[in-house]
Image: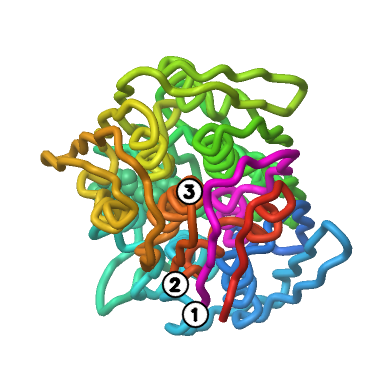
Amino acid sequence: MSSFIINGGQRLHGKIEISGSKNAALPIIFATIVTKGISKIVGLPNISDVRVALDILKSMGATIHCDGEAVYIDTVMLEYREPSAELVCQIRASSYLLGACLSRFGRAHLSAFGGCNFERRPIDMHLAAAVSLGARCENGELTAKSLHGSDITFKKTSVGATVNAILMASGAQGKTKIYGYAREPHVFSLIEFLRGGGAAISFCNDYIEIEGRELSGSCATVIPDMIEAGTYAVISLITGSELEISGINRQDLSSFFNALVRGGATLVFSGDSVFPQGIIDEFLSVTTAPHPSFPTDLQPIMAPLLAAFCGGRLTESVWLSRFGYLSLLSGFGVKYELNGSSATIYPSDLHPATVEAPDLRGGAALLIAALKAEGESRIDSAQIINRGYENIVNKLRGIGAQIKEIQ
Ligand code: UD1
């Protein structure tokens, strides 16, 4: 358990280097299970979710070593073992063990997968995909003598189910088509990684087509974390700073950047950097939806920004009740009204508060409010925020924020 102590109200200066994406790194780490060989992954973020994922692989017999920026994962000697409940329950991405283990070993254990519990997180579509490839689901386990290619159609866009379906189909005999797939950048970076190991994967607008085969080790450079980039862009605007946010992929964040510009902010792009400037001078409405629409993970991040300027409306179409963090944000003076899957945020004077981080992005929203509010705030359970933001305390200190972490 740790806490952040923040003396807010400071203007910040300088450059933030964006780290590798958590949501891209984790599927690639679990995808090494499907490959037999040594994979090289460059730019893994040093965050607890990644460390736990690597520990899960080690517990299954993988050999892992680091060399500077690169991590090498050798999965040749991997064996099926029921994963440690203590590790699995710490991260949501452990649900990728379903697809990866079924693909490689023909069995996978249904565990209590962890992660942020802002809402019940079903896995019915992951299981339906496994069943359509020939797996049986009984007694808390998925089993299959062999998987065979099939057509999978998702009724709803799901990143998790898409990743699992890709992992399963990569080890299945014959061709699989996945309709209604998620188009997040991290889905495509996973596909690139698997292709590097010999996977036959192609995609068109309607479906991803995979012809299963034995895969060898591969290489990946983890793409930049678009949620981290969005978080620092909001920090720059709310604190009236002119930060340079470097190492971004502008295209991945276009719906988020468009929303900021619609609200009145100025974004200056140069190479792979963005300099967010100005103020939000309009009531701003955003609605989350699967990529390329506004990402649900940036919805909580927007709330303090809207409160500090002209207010706005946040509507969820991915996680309809992802607003639990708002009652904690009200501790900073944020006024809001919740109406089903929409929250109206009113212009508010932010003041310091002592609060507890409820989940990763909700916790980041509290941290943003604390950076804006003049005076000392405290955020308990800060380890939840460290789960998704590499080196956040030092990065913020490096641009002049007064923040420290205490155990
Ligand atoms: C989702 C987000 C992802 C974000 C993550 C954590 C989307 C499409 N996905 O990914 O960007 O990083 O949360 O905040 O924006 N669902 C089912 N059945 C299933 C699986 C999912 O009904 O078997 C529903 C969920 O209830 C949810 C939606 O599909 O409403 C999206 O879920 P999914 O994309 O699977 O969640 P994550 O992979 O965690």
What is the count of numbered marks?
3
Proximity of marks 2 and 1: CB atoms separated by less than 8 Å: yes
**Residue nearest the observer in this picture, 22 or 178:** 22
As helix, strand or loop, the secondary structure at mark 2 comes to loop
**One can see residue 160 in this view:** no
The first of marks 2 and 1 along the sequence is: 1
Mark on residue 366? none
The first of marks 1 and 3 along the sequence is: 1
Q: Position of residue 160 (x, y in %)?
A: 41, 51
As helix, strand or loop, the secondary structure at mark 1 comes to loop
Of marks 2 and 3, the one in the foreground? 3
| Amino acid beneath label 2 | Ser
Left or right relative to 49: residue 314: left
Q: Which residue is mark 2?
A: 381
What coloring was used for the rendering? rainbow
Mark on residue 368? 3
Residue at (62% x, 40% y) in the render:
11
Disc 2 to disc 1, how far (Cα)?
6 Å
Mark on residue 1? 1
